[in-house]
Amino acid sequence: MLRVYGSGSPVRLFVAGIHGDEWRDTSQLLLDVKPPETGTLAVIPMVDNGEYISTLDNNYYTGPGNPILEAIEKLHPEVYLELHSYSKENYARLTDDDRLSKEGVPAYNELKNGLLLGSVPPYIRLGSFSMESLCISFEIQRSNERSYQFAAELVEVVSECKTRYDFVVYLLEKFPQQAIKAIENYRKFYVL
Protein backbone atom coordinates (compact mmCIF):
# COMPACT_ATOMS: atom_id res chain seq x y z
CA MET A 1 0.00 0.00 0.00
CA LEU A 2 1.39 3.39 -1.07
CA ARG A 3 1.67 5.99 1.70
CA VAL A 4 2.46 9.62 0.86
CA TYR A 5 3.83 12.24 3.28
CA GLY A 6 4.33 15.91 2.54
CA SER A 7 3.90 17.56 -0.84
CA GLY A 8 5.81 19.25 -3.61
CA SER A 9 9.31 18.76 -4.89
CA PRO A 10 11.51 16.87 -4.53
CA VAL A 11 9.56 13.64 -4.68
CA ARG A 12 11.13 10.59 -3.04
CA LEU A 13 9.92 6.99 -3.36
CA PHE A 14 11.13 4.31 -0.93
CA VAL A 15 10.17 0.64 -1.31
CA ALA A 16 10.70 -2.41 0.90
CA GLY A 17 9.37 -5.94 1.25
CA ILE A 18 10.31 -6.36 -2.39
CA HIS A 19 10.38 -10.14 -2.64
CA GLY A 20 10.26 -13.28 -0.58
CA ASP A 21 10.46 -12.70 3.15
CA GLU A 22 12.62 -9.56 2.99
CA TRP A 23 9.73 -7.63 4.50
CA ARG A 24 10.72 -9.08 7.88
CA ASP A 25 13.98 -7.12 7.75
CA THR A 26 12.97 -4.02 5.80
CA SER A 27 9.30 -3.02 6.00
CA GLN A 28 9.35 -1.60 9.51
CA LEU A 29 12.04 0.88 8.48
CA LEU A 30 9.56 2.51 6.11
CA LEU A 31 6.69 2.32 8.57
CA ASP A 32 8.87 4.27 11.05
CA VAL A 33 10.41 6.85 8.69
CA LYS A 34 9.67 10.48 9.51
CA PRO A 35 8.20 12.77 6.83
CA PRO A 36 10.83 15.04 5.26
CA GLU A 37 11.10 18.72 6.13
CA THR A 38 10.48 19.63 2.49
CA GLY A 39 9.01 17.85 -0.49
CA THR A 40 7.22 14.53 -0.75
CA LEU A 41 8.06 11.10 0.59
CA ALA A 42 6.08 8.15 -0.76
CA VAL A 43 6.69 4.71 0.73
CA ILE A 44 5.60 1.21 -0.13
CA PRO A 45 6.51 -0.78 3.00
CA MET A 46 5.65 -4.13 1.41
CA VAL A 47 5.68 -4.57 -2.34
CA ASP A 48 5.32 -8.36 -2.33
CA ASN A 49 5.74 -11.11 0.25
CA GLY A 50 5.23 -13.98 -2.16
CA GLU A 51 7.67 -16.17 -4.00
CA TYR A 52 11.17 -14.77 -4.38
CA ILE A 53 11.68 -13.41 -7.91
CA SER A 54 14.90 -11.50 -8.51
CA THR A 55 14.59 -7.82 -9.37
CA LEU A 56 17.24 -8.55 -12.02
CA ASP A 57 14.56 -10.56 -13.83
CA ASN A 58 12.66 -8.07 -16.03
CA ASN A 59 9.47 -10.07 -15.39
CA TYR A 60 9.61 -8.96 -11.78
CA TYR A 61 8.39 -5.46 -12.66
CA THR A 62 5.54 -6.71 -14.86
CA GLY A 63 4.49 -9.11 -12.09
CA PRO A 64 4.92 -8.63 -8.34
CA GLY A 65 6.95 -5.43 -8.77
CA ASN A 66 4.28 -3.69 -10.84
CA PRO A 67 3.21 -1.47 -7.87
CA ILE A 68 6.69 0.08 -8.02
CA LEU A 69 6.28 1.00 -11.69
CA GLU A 70 2.78 2.36 -11.04
CA ALA A 71 4.11 4.56 -8.22
CA ILE A 72 6.96 5.83 -10.41
CA GLU A 73 4.58 6.66 -13.25
CA LYS A 74 2.21 8.45 -10.86
CA LEU A 75 4.78 10.35 -8.79
CA HIS A 76 7.84 10.87 -11.05
CA PRO A 77 10.30 10.68 -8.11
CA GLU A 78 13.73 12.26 -8.24
CA VAL A 79 14.99 10.06 -5.38
CA TYR A 80 14.35 6.30 -5.33
CA LEU A 81 15.44 3.86 -2.62
CA GLU A 82 15.03 0.07 -2.50
CA LEU A 83 15.55 -1.79 0.77
CA HIS A 84 16.63 -5.41 0.56
CA SER A 85 18.09 -7.91 3.02
CA TYR A 86 20.65 -10.66 2.63
CA SER A 87 22.06 -13.61 4.52
CA LYS A 88 25.74 -13.65 5.52
CA GLU A 89 26.42 -16.47 3.08
CA ASN A 90 25.47 -14.17 0.17
CA TYR A 91 27.86 -11.38 1.17
CA ALA A 92 30.69 -12.50 -1.13
CA ARG A 93 28.38 -12.80 -4.16
CA LEU A 94 26.86 -9.34 -3.60
CA THR A 95 30.23 -7.61 -3.13
CA ASP A 96 32.13 -9.59 -5.79
CA ASP A 97 34.19 -7.21 -7.97
CA ASP A 98 33.24 -9.41 -10.96
CA ARG A 99 29.50 -9.11 -10.26
CA LEU A 100 29.05 -6.90 -13.31
CA SER A 101 30.31 -9.61 -15.67
CA LYS A 102 28.65 -12.45 -13.73
CA GLU A 103 25.22 -10.95 -12.98
CA GLY A 104 25.02 -7.82 -15.13
CA VAL A 105 25.05 -5.33 -12.24
CA PRO A 106 27.79 -3.58 -10.28
CA ALA A 107 28.95 -4.94 -6.94
CA TYR A 108 27.55 -3.64 -3.67
CA ASN A 109 29.92 -1.82 -1.31
CA GLU A 110 29.80 -2.25 2.45
CA LEU A 111 29.42 1.06 4.25
CA LYS A 112 29.58 -0.37 7.79
CA ASN A 113 27.92 -2.93 10.07
CA GLY A 114 27.15 -5.23 7.14
CA LEU A 115 25.01 -2.61 5.37
CA LEU A 116 25.63 -2.67 1.63
CA LEU A 117 25.12 0.17 -0.85
CA GLY A 118 24.43 -0.41 -4.52
CA SER A 119 22.38 0.65 -7.47
CA VAL A 120 18.92 -0.49 -8.44
CA PRO A 121 18.37 -2.99 -11.28
CA PRO A 122 19.09 -1.70 -14.79
CA TYR A 123 15.52 -2.39 -15.96
CA ILE A 124 14.11 0.19 -13.60
CA ARG A 125 17.12 2.55 -13.47
CA LEU A 126 17.44 2.98 -17.20
CA GLY A 127 13.76 2.62 -18.05
CA SER A 128 12.14 4.84 -15.42
CA PHE A 129 14.57 7.52 -14.26
CA SER A 130 16.74 10.29 -15.66
CA MET A 131 20.47 10.01 -15.19
CA GLU A 132 20.23 12.89 -12.68
CA SER A 133 17.97 10.91 -10.34
CA LEU A 134 19.29 9.32 -7.16
CA CYS A 135 18.51 5.60 -7.41
CA ILE A 136 20.09 3.47 -4.69
CA SER A 137 19.65 0.17 -2.96
CA PHE A 138 20.56 -0.82 0.58
CA GLU A 139 21.07 -4.45 1.53
CA ILE A 140 20.60 -5.01 5.26
CA GLN A 141 22.34 -8.04 6.75
CA ARG A 142 19.77 -10.33 8.33
CA SER A 143 19.95 -10.98 12.06
CA ASN A 144 22.33 -8.05 12.48
CA GLU A 145 20.80 -5.36 14.70
CA ARG A 146 23.67 -2.96 14.01
CA SER A 147 23.08 -3.29 10.26
CA TYR A 148 19.37 -2.62 10.79
CA GLN A 149 20.01 0.44 13.01
CA PHE A 150 22.49 1.89 10.56
CA ALA A 151 19.98 1.34 7.75
CA ALA A 152 17.41 3.29 9.79
CA GLU A 153 19.88 6.19 10.05
CA LEU A 154 20.57 6.14 6.32
CA VAL A 155 16.88 5.99 5.42
CA GLU A 156 16.47 9.24 7.38
CA VAL A 157 19.46 10.78 5.57
CA VAL A 158 18.05 9.85 2.15
CA SER A 159 14.59 11.10 3.14
CA GLU A 160 16.05 14.60 3.41
CA CYS A 161 18.09 14.43 0.16
CA LYS A 162 16.81 16.80 -2.50
CA THR A 163 19.12 15.58 -5.26
CA ARG A 164 21.56 12.77 -5.88
CA TYR A 165 24.37 15.23 -5.17
CA ASP A 166 23.18 15.63 -1.58
CA PHE A 167 23.71 11.92 -1.04
CA VAL A 168 27.04 11.87 -2.88
CA VAL A 169 28.33 14.71 -0.66
CA TYR A 170 27.15 12.81 2.44
CA LEU A 171 28.93 9.64 1.25
CA LEU A 172 32.14 11.48 0.39
CA GLU A 173 32.22 13.07 3.85
CA LYS A 174 31.34 9.96 5.87
CA PHE A 175 32.59 7.07 3.70
CA PRO A 176 35.11 8.44 1.18
CA GLN A 177 36.56 5.11 0.01
CA GLN A 178 33.15 3.52 -0.47
CA ALA A 179 31.86 6.65 -2.19
CA ILE A 180 34.69 6.62 -4.71
CA LYS A 181 34.08 2.92 -5.41
CA ALA A 182 30.32 3.49 -5.80
CA ILE A 183 30.93 6.38 -8.21
CA GLU A 184 33.37 4.23 -10.24
CA ASN A 185 30.80 1.42 -10.43
CA TYR A 186 28.10 3.85 -11.49
CA ARG A 187 30.26 5.32 -14.25
CA LYS A 188 31.35 1.89 -15.52
CA PHE A 189 27.83 0.65 -15.80
CA TYR A 190 25.59 3.63 -16.57
CA VAL A 191 27.77 6.20 -18.31
CA LEU A 192 30.17 4.27 -20.50
Image (spheres, rainbow, N blue to C red):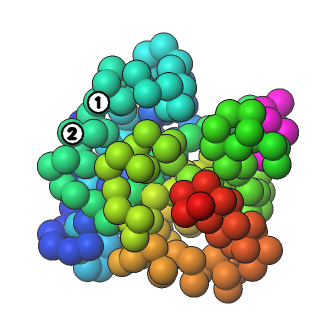
Other residues around mark 1 within 10 Å, as few (<14) / some (14–19) / many (≥20)? some
Instruction: State the image coordinates of residue 123 (x, y, percent, origin top left).
Output: 43, 39
Which sits in the foreground, 154 or 163?
163
Examine the structure image and report whether residue 122 is included in the region drawn in magenta.
no
State left or right for residue 173 relative to residue 167: right
Name the main secondary structure of what is drawn in magenta: helix
Residue at 21% from the left image edge and 74% from the top image edge: 9
Closer to the camera in the image, 51 or 101? 101
| Residue at which label 1 appears | 66
Q: Quadrant of the C terminus?
A: bottom right
98 lies above or below 65: below
Q: Quadrant of residue 18?
A: top left
- State the extent of the magenta-drawn residues as a range: 88-95
Is 89 colored magenta in this rendering?
Answer: yes
Q: Residues within 10 Å of mark 2 (few under 14, many from 20)?
A: few
- Percent coordinates x, y for residue 25 in the rendering: 57, 38
Q: Residue at x 18, y 55 (%)?
A: 75
State yes or no: discs 2 and 1 in contact (Cβ < 8 Å).
yes
Q: Write down the residue under mark 2.
A: 70
Q: Which mark is residue 22?
A: none
Estimate the x, y position of residue 155 in percent, counting from the top left.
49, 62
Query: Among all residues in the image, which is located at the extreme top?
Result: 51
Q: Quadrant of residue 159?
A: bottom left
Could you tell me how many numbered marks the image carries?
A: 2
**Residue found at x 53% / y 19%:** 52
